[in-house]
Amino acid sequence: MLTIFCAGILGTTIMTGFSHVVELLSGHKFNEAHLLNQLIGLSKTMKDNVDNNYYLGWLIHFLIGMSMAAIMYAYYFHFNKDIVIWTGLIFGTALGVLGVAGWSMIISNHSNPPKINWTYFFLQLILAHMIFGITVSWILARFSSYA
């Protein structure tokens, strides 16, 4: 469990760092936790003032990352004992596509989504998830008891 927790936290942190760097270089909004907080803040039900570093967006973001790390661990544990970086890249790509689908559903059902270039966000989201998948796979390969 500790390995899954650490893999999820580190994978999400590195992924978010990548998104933040691309955000700084491009001028587009890419930080997933900040966008989650914007969605929370712009919702009709939220009465409080929500800034980029509101705890709820960060909590949701990291819980999803740990869940995805747990799914990757379960796959490696039950189906493929040989953890390789290529598998992490494939997993990350699939998670990126899943992330795009999830974000698309959220913004299409939100009453007032943030005004950003969603196409650019989705493209960088796939790359960020590829980095996540590689990071989690690397950690699982190094620290899992069955590897």
Image: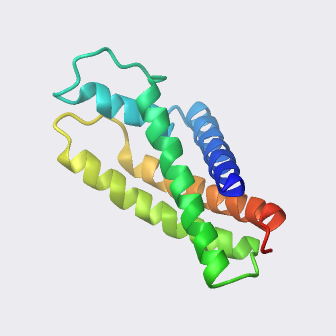
Above or below residue 123? Residue 17 is above
Q: Residue at x 65, y 39 (%)?
A: 17
Above or below residue 119? Residue 43 is above
Q: Quadrant of the N terminus?
A: bottom right
Give the percent coordinates (x, y) of residue 54. 44, 23
Q: Nearer the viewer, residue 114 or 51?
A: 51
Above or below residue 110? Residue 2 is below
Residue located farthest toward the right when viewing the structure as drawn? 142
Give the percent coordinates (x, y) of residue 22. 60, 40
Give the percent coordinates (x, y) of residue 81. 73, 81
Q: Quadrant of the C terminus?
A: bottom right
Give the percent coordinates (x, y) of residue 146. 78, 74
Q: Nearer the viewer, residue 2 or 14?
A: 2
Q: Is residue 146 left or right of residue 13?
A: right
Q: Is residue 39 left or right of residue 90?
A: left
Query: Residue 77's image quarter?
Result: bottom right
Residue located farthest toward the bottom when viewing the structure as drawn? 79
- Residue 29 seen by the camera: no
Q: Residue at x 43, y 57 (%)?
A: 99
Q: Residue at x 43, y 53 (%)?
A: 122
Q: Is residue 145 left or right of residue 4?
A: right
Query: Residue 3's image quarter?
Result: bottom right
- Residue 111 seen by the camera: yes
Count all numbered tags in the image, as a single digit.
Answer: 0
Q: Residue at x 35, y 56 (%)?
A: 102
